[in-house]
């Protein structure tokens, strides 16, 4: 795993990708520190992180798009498949490398509360809790980006899909607010979601039988629930959208609240998508 980690780190710093990601992220943070903290005289760094939480969505695809898509395109993934290393070690090596690049950004950010303390009273516990949460939020997005990169040979396609998925998690609650709240709309909404999930499962497994069974069973269950107990769909779209809204879980940290459930959620999302990436690679290895 250490060899894969070192290889990935060298790749990022022997090309422009790592430098561009770090430079743009730090520039974004610096810009918001100037406008939020210095211009408006807020000594709370968590406001800055809250302000850039959406803009970061455009930066994470830059660093995840090549993780596995490049290996797939150049067919060097075959070398990984025949490597004595386990798939788990290979994936963790790649993931920890991209997390390390992001950790550099967050490490530099740790100095901002110290600087701001010269201009006002700083809630250090709240600020550093927000930095930790923002780091874990980024780790979740990096895991999602790596998973998408594993499913394609095109870096550009991986970047675009990752950006779309991240933006959906950002605006999911807002989108849900515009949808009708009647039972039929909720049923059709979930039917569409499971159709999309079916396509993802097929892309991962390339097994038409399993995919078809999953699609049929899920759609039948949704239809039966609607016919037998339609009230179960009341408010369900909003509840599910709130659960998938990764970004909204950061809100409490802006107020200096240490939300343990949000931290657990971010870690769970990261572990889930690392695991799913392993399954994609394992499936390709034995195909």
Image (tube, rainbow, N blue to C red):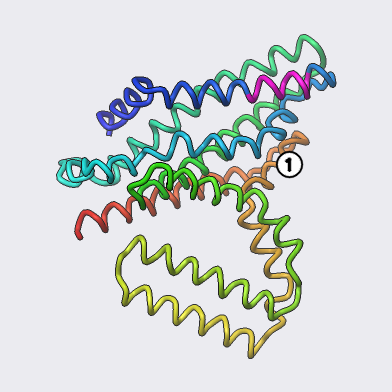
Position above or below: 45 against 258: above
Residue at position x 66%, y 60% from top? Answer: 241
Residue at the bottom extreme? 228
Position above or below: 229 against 165: below
Instruction: Please tell me whether residue 21 belongs to the stretch shown in magenta.
Output: no
In depth, the one of 239 and 64 nearer the eye is: 64
Q: Residues within 10 Å of mark 1 (few under 14, many from 20)?
A: some
Q: Quadrant of the N terminus?
A: top left
Q: Quadrant of the C terminus?
A: bottom left
Residue at the right extreme? 40
In terms of secondary structure, what is the magenta stretch mainly? helix
In depth, the one of 217 and 19 nearer the eye is: 19
The residue wearing badge 1 is 252
Residue 18 horizontal side relative to residue 247, left or right: left
In depth, the one of 49 and 21 nearer the eye is: 21
Residue 95: x %, y % from top left = 39, 38
Residue 122 horizontal side relative to residue 63, left or right: right
Q: Secondary structure at mark 1?
A: helix
Residue 51: x %, y % from top left = 72, 33
Residue 267 horizontal side relative to residue 28, left or right: left
Residue 101: x %, y % from top left = 45, 26
Residue 211 horizontal side relative to residue 145, left or right: left
Report how many numbered discs are placed on residues in the image.
1
Position above or below: 191 against 101: below
Residue at position x 79%, y 16% from top? Answer: 38
Residue at position x 54%, y 37% from top? Answer: 138
Residue at the top extreme? 118
Q: Quadrant of residue 256?
A: top right
Position above or below: 151 against 179: above
Residue at position x 33%, y 51% from top? Answer: 278
Q: Which residues are magenta?
A: 28-37
Residue 78: x %, y % from top left = 18, 45
């Amino acid at each position: 795993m250490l060899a894969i980690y070192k290889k990935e780190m060298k790749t990022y710093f022997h090309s422009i990708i790592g430098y561009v990601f770090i430079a743009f992220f730090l520039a974004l943070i610096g810009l918001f520190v100037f406008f939020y903290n210095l211009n408006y005289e807020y000594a709370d760094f968590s406001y800055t992180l809250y302000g850039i939480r959406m803009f970061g969505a455009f930066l994470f695809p830059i660093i995840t798009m090549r993780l596995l898509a490049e290996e797939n395109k150049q067919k060097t993934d075959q070398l990984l498949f025949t490597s004595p290393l386990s798939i788990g070690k290979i994936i963790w090596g790649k993931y920890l490398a991209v997390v390390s690049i992001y950790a550099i950004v967050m490490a530099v950010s740790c100095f901002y509360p110290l600087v701001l303390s010269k201009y006002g009273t700083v809630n250090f516990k709240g600020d550093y809790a927000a930095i930790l949460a923002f780091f874990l939020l980024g780790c979740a997005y990096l895991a999602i980006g790596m998973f998408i990169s594993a499913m394609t040979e095109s870096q550009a396609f991986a970047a675009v899909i990752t950006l779309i998925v991240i933006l959906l998690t950002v605006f999911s609650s807002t989108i849900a607010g515009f949808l009708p709240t009647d039972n039929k709309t909720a049923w059709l909404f979930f039917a569409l979601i499971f159709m999309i999930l079916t396509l993802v499962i097929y892309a991962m497994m390339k097994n038409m039988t399993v995919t078809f069974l999953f699609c049929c069973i899920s759609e039948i269950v949704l239809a039966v629930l609607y016919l037998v107990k339609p009230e179960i769909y009341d408010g369900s779209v909003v509840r599910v959208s709130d659960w998938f809204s990764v970004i909204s879980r950061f809100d409490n940290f802006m107020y200096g609240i240490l939300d343990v459930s949000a931290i657990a959620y971010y870690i769970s999302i990261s572990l889930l998508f690392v695991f799913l990436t392993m399954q994609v690679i394992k499936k390709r290895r034995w195909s």
